[in-house]
């Protein structure tokens, strides 16, 4: 556990999703500590808006993505995300085939039950009441 950053102030440069919701952009917080986990540095931050979260700084993601031949996109708003998607689509080669599977549940059971019920009532009426024995 590294406490050299303890007490330093930081802020989010884009919205950060977490298990209790989302932190908006420019949310400030205080760093409690940093720790290394499987070769990555995680920073535990007490945000002023309430939650305390472990976050990954962008300076950790960028080298990791670029080392594998990828490109890092810091998505701060929706337009940046759409631009990143367009860039990814332009760079990608080939086609992706997609198979869609769906399941259908039969929906005839209520109608079959109603038909059987009406047939049973008609049979019962025909056998018990003489008026229903003749066809008009």
Image (cartoon, helix red, strand yellow):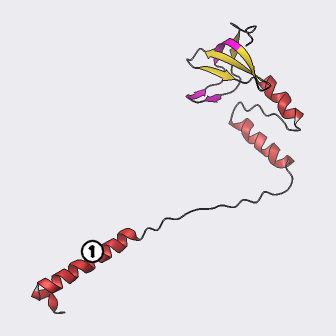
Position of the N terminus by quadrant:
top right
| Occupied quadrant, residue 57 | top right
**Residue 135 appears left or right of 12:** left
Residue interval drawn in magenta: 13-33
Q: Position of residue 30 (x, y in %)?
A: 66, 11
Position of the C terminus by quadrant:
bottom left
**Residue 121 appears left or right of 48:** left
| Residue at image coords 76%, 31% | 74
Vertical placement of residue 23 versus 68, above or below: above
Taking the magenta stretch, the answer to whether it contains residue 30 is yes
Q: Position of residue 134 (x, y in %)?
A: 16, 93
Secondary structure at badge 1 equals helix
Vertical placement of residue 9 versus 96, above or below: above
| Occupied quadrant, residue 26 | top right
Taking the magenta stretch, the answer to whether it contains residue 66 is no
Q: Position of residue 100 (x, y in %)?
A: 65, 61
| Residue at image coords 65%, 16% | 45
| Residue at image coords 67%, 17% | 44
| Occupied quadrant, residue 118 | bottom left
Q: Which residue is mark 1?
A: 117
Vertical placement of residue 68 versus 44, above or below: below
Q: Position of residue 27 (x, y in %)?
A: 64, 19
């Amino acid at each position: 556990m590294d406490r050299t950053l303890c007490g330093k102030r930081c802020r989010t440069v884009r919205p950060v999703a977490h298990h209790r919701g989302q932190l908006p952009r420019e949310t400030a917080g205080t760093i409690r500590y940093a720790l290394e986990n499987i070769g990555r540095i995680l920073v535990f931050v007490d945000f002023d808006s309430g939650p305390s979260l472990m976050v990954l700084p962008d300076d950790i993601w960028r080298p990791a993505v670029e080392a594998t031949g990828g490109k890092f996109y810091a998505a701060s708003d929706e337009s940046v995300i759409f631009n990143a998607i367009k860039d990814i689509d332009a760079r990608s080669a080939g086609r992706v085939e997609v198979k869609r599977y769906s399941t259908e549940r039969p929906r005839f059971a209520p109608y079959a039950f109603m038909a059987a019920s009406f047939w049973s009532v008609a049979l019962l009426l025909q056998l018990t009441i003489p008026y229903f024995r003749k066809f008009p």
